[in-house]
Image (cartoon, grey):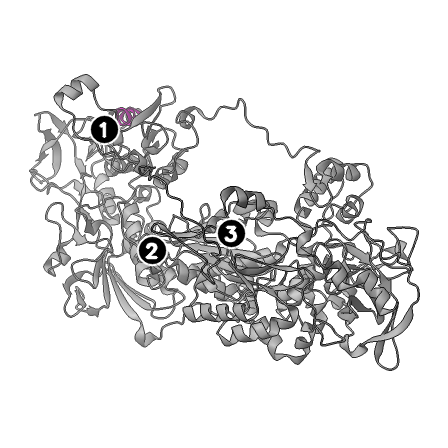
Amino acid sequence: MSWATSSPGMAVSKQPEGATVDGPEAPASKRRKIVVVGLGMVGVAFIEKLLKLDAKRREYDVVVIGEEAHVAYNRVGLTSFFQHRKEENLYLNTKEWYGSHAEGALNYHLNTKVTEIKPKEKVVLTSSGEAVSYDALILATGSDAVLPKHTPGHDAKGVFVYRTIEDLQKLIEFSATVKGTTGAVVGGGLLGLEAAKAMMDLEDFKQVKLIERNRWVLSRQLDGEAGGLVVELVRNLGLDVMLSKRVGKIEVDENNAVKGVVFEDGERMDCTCLMFAIGIKARDELARAAGLACADRGGGITVDDDLRTSDPDIYAIGECSSWQKQTFGLIAPGIEQADVLSFNLTQAKVHSPRKFKQPDLSTKLKLLGVEVASFGDFFADRDGPKDLPKRHVKKEGEQTKVQALTNGPPVPAVKALTYKDPFQSVYKKYIFTPDGKYLLGGMMIGDTKDYVKLVPMVKSKKALDVLPSEFIVGASKDGEENADDLSDDTQICSCHNVTKGDVASVVKDGSCKSIGEVKSCTKAGTGCGGCMPLVQSIFNNAMKDMGQEVLNHLCPHFKYSRADLYNIIYVKKLHGFAAVMKEVGTDPESLGCEVCKPAIGSILASMFNKHVMEKPLHGLQDTNDRYLGNIQRNGTFSVIPRVAGGEISPDKLIVIGQVAKKYGLYTKITGGQRIDMFGAKKQDLLDIWTELVAGGMESGHAYAKSLRTVKSCVGTTWCRFGIGDSVGMAVRLEERYKSIRAPHKIKGGVSGCVRECAEAQNKDFGLIATEKGFNIFVGGNGGATPKHSEILAKDVPPDDVIPILDRYLMFYMRTADKLQRTARWLEQLPGGIKYLREVVLEDKLGICADLEKQMQELIGTFFCEWTEAINDPEKRKQFEQFANTSETKDPAVEGIVERNQPRPSYWAKNSALEDFKGTRWSNLTWQPIVEASKFTDVETGSSRTVLRGDTQLAVFKLKGKYYASQQMCPHKRTFGLSDGLIGESTGPECGNDKKLWVSCPYHKRNFQLNGEVDFGANDKGAGSCSNDTSMSIATFAAEEREDGWVYLKLPSVHELDNVLGTKKWAVKANESEDPFADLDKKLGLKKGLRGTRMGAQTIGAVPGTGNMDARQAVSAAAAPRIDW
């Protein structure tokens, strides 16, 4: 069974050691027994699909009873038997395959005919005298070749049908006795042409003739012109085709052997062998005898859309079944029925059952060496279209005779585009809607290479983006758009106004040879960092243009890429940053930097999943992970509990409301279907989490580079259009992958049908329910550079979704670059989506079992990070606002109330550009500020915030030494430097004077902590900013003394507050203007709201609703309804 769009199928690896499967395996005593009657192509297809879909749950044992002496073989390829004469070459599976399954999973019986079905007893009786019980009975008895018993001589020696291996063996034996005579085939359809080729391949007959009652062959697939071309081609190959002929009588000799044929028109023809290939008849005699409903005309066991017969425990599939009074002689509809039934028996518990629908009767064959294909509604121009796209379905009344005369004939419902090349013997006819926007079907002779592309176009019913003529003559090459890169004057970094040309020039003139040097030289990427993928791309292209090697090193501290480091850490089992630095760092004793620390922290988390607040790991985390919440611009945090799949109970909603109200939090629904609570103070986080956890909730990991949400629509849970339980699948996926950390955040989505309400096609992974399961999309994202996802696999049964996503996500986690979303990773993956399919679905690298095992081990380590922090006294200490006092400070951005909710006022327009590092303090004295026990001795460093008067200070302990600075970053006047990542310069040029810096967690301004203050230079010495020389910070000497306290050399409290006081630099509401003031005035709104009207009255202020405005009602005359 193939999930991939272009690969042979998903490689099913053995269960990884230590891994578990989804769903418990049923005990043998509780397994249901399925009996399959018939071991043909459809019967074995059903068994294969059922065994695969049931592999995890093991709910069924299968018994199959075959009437022939052979295991299932390829009837479509019977003609090849004349070349090799070996039955086993036709077998669809080896004989060993039937015995290779789990004990009891499959039992088979050959040369055994089922003689009776007893529905009440749920038993079938066999020719060998056995009674076989069943829980579900599948009838796949197929059909018999039609032999016209009303025709005199039909039972003569030399009359054959073309159906089984035995039929061919009898023909081979007989032909040897009539060498040099004429053989004939009656029937010019697909089977007739195959039979004619078989007789020609025997080389026993002097001449082979094909007798067809119509004016051309393949009349069920081709029109007259196409069928006539086939006749011409096969005649050139030596087959004598006789058209418009009906057999009236078969002449026999005294031994009842065929000697000729008399046609209904009186003409006579000599022949010794006659093979009938005029159709098939459904084998429904068993079902009729058992009282099952069967079709009166044409025969066949009547089934509904579930393939169920009139007995609820008996099903019929393949040529023996009659669906909507139709039987199908092609193999494809039978395989589709097997697919539907096996799916419903195994997957319908977690997905809406599939329905059998009008099958696709497209055909592509090579008959007597002639390529022939028909697809879609190939007779739409002759019989009228059967299934037009909705926009083309019009309700039109019949025209009167007068209207027909005045208006002319009605516009045709379709238009055909025809191409015929008599020199190359090529014929193509494609049928379109009248506007040429939709392809409906067609036929091809001689050149069928476009068949595989055209069939999906018809099935999808999507509007075409090319002209119909391009299907024949190809696309025009003139005037194609040029896809050049951005121009040199395009701004790529808005933080520092850096253009593409700025980056490219410093690379090409030799100034910068690494991405780190580019950042230092141009400042690009040193602000918010959002431009870094583009900067990296420009750098790579410039280096390639110069013929230089592009180094993908993580940072100056590691001459390896993130993927390289992942493999090193994985193989060597390195469990900490210091161990990694000593093993492969450029300086074994380095503190690292703001680039490598979080990258290695992410790798360690994605392997071992230790709590990120553990002492050795805490210093690797950016501020969000450091305090398990997203830091906001006023220094508070947002709190987002897990709402798996967007499904939440009223009780949990009440808990969220109570918590938000108690702690004065701003609430908003997120794009990922969760509820975000903003404005939580660091010192309140533990209490907030405690109440949420007590209410049955857990961390939503919205702060981490990990799975965020799996968005869903309601699917079959509520929606009348849903065909898949999107909520159920989304909940299961979110529960599985919650908390796992990756190179970047991961978002998922599950839609219950093609209406795509969950927007699954712009997610890192997305599922869209189909009738056969789910289509899996990967590598999409929104954000600054949105990208539509690409399809990884189609029609995946629910049970197989998890293994595929396990492999995909773990392969991404192993190989992606730092901070690389799946979209960019897939774009840069050599071979792209095709290679990803080969790795994930076909196991090209032989690592799928290991990927599944590693993911299962990682998932098994899950814990709620909030709960762990609540219950750990050491972790609780990290949430103190100040390490030296229990006093607290309100956020340093003045709050306002808007739409009845609190929020911080807008950013101040101006940065604090005072020369803080150059401050000439009048008098500095050593003062005991904080106990040394508040700091930890870890390789990544330790830091705390302290309060002195009204001034907040940041104190750092790095490699046993202490450093101190102001807490405020001048850029946006935020107070958070103590929570920034510490960096250390590296390289031989640094000598013993290595720079230590802190990177502000808000916008990554890097301030030097060590060294002497250089009063004459903005960009040098302690307090200087390496990536924005317009600003600086004040630094202070610090040391630990024998009394166990850390002393800072500070000015008086009064002087300190005059320069650095919190109140002085707190952002006030009046420092910025309301950007919507003019718009609100123009529209008559108050903070975006207008009065709510009920009837002709306007409701005034309603407490708690956000509607705080009451205005006089404005009446207006109602305009007629506009129907769009």
* Image x and y of residue 41, in percent: 29, 51
Q: Answer yes or no: is residue 146 visible.
A: yes
Counting residues from the start of the chain, the first of labels 1 and 3 encountered is 1
Q: Are marks 1 and 3 in contact (CB under 8 Å)?
A: no
Q: Give the range drawn in magenta.
A: 225-234
Counting residues from the start of the chain, the first of labels 3 and 2 encountered is 2
Q: Which of marks 3 and 2 is in front?
A: 2
**Label 2 neighbour load within 10 Å: few <14, some 14-19, many 20+:** some
What amino acid is found at the position of numbered circle 1 in the picture?
Answer: Arg
What amino acid is found at the position of numbered circle 2 in the picture?
Answer: Cys
Q: Pointer 1: what residue?
A: 382
* Image x and y of residue 110, in percent: 26, 61
**Viewer-closest of 869 and 1108:** 1108
Q: Pointer 2: what residue?
A: 719
Q: Pointer 3: what residue?
A: 763
Q: Which of marks 1 and 3 is in front?
A: 3
**Label 3 neighbour load within 10 Å: few <14, some 14-19, many 20+:** many
Relative vertical location of residue 548 with respect to residue 813 in this rendering, above or below? above
Residue 230 shown in magenta: yes
Report helix, strand or loop for mark 3.
loop
Q: In this view, does 877 lie to the left or right of 518?
A: left
Residue at the spot x=76%, y=60% of the render? 1064
* Image x and y of residue 931, in percent: 80, 78
Q: Is residue 901 left or right of residue 398?
A: right
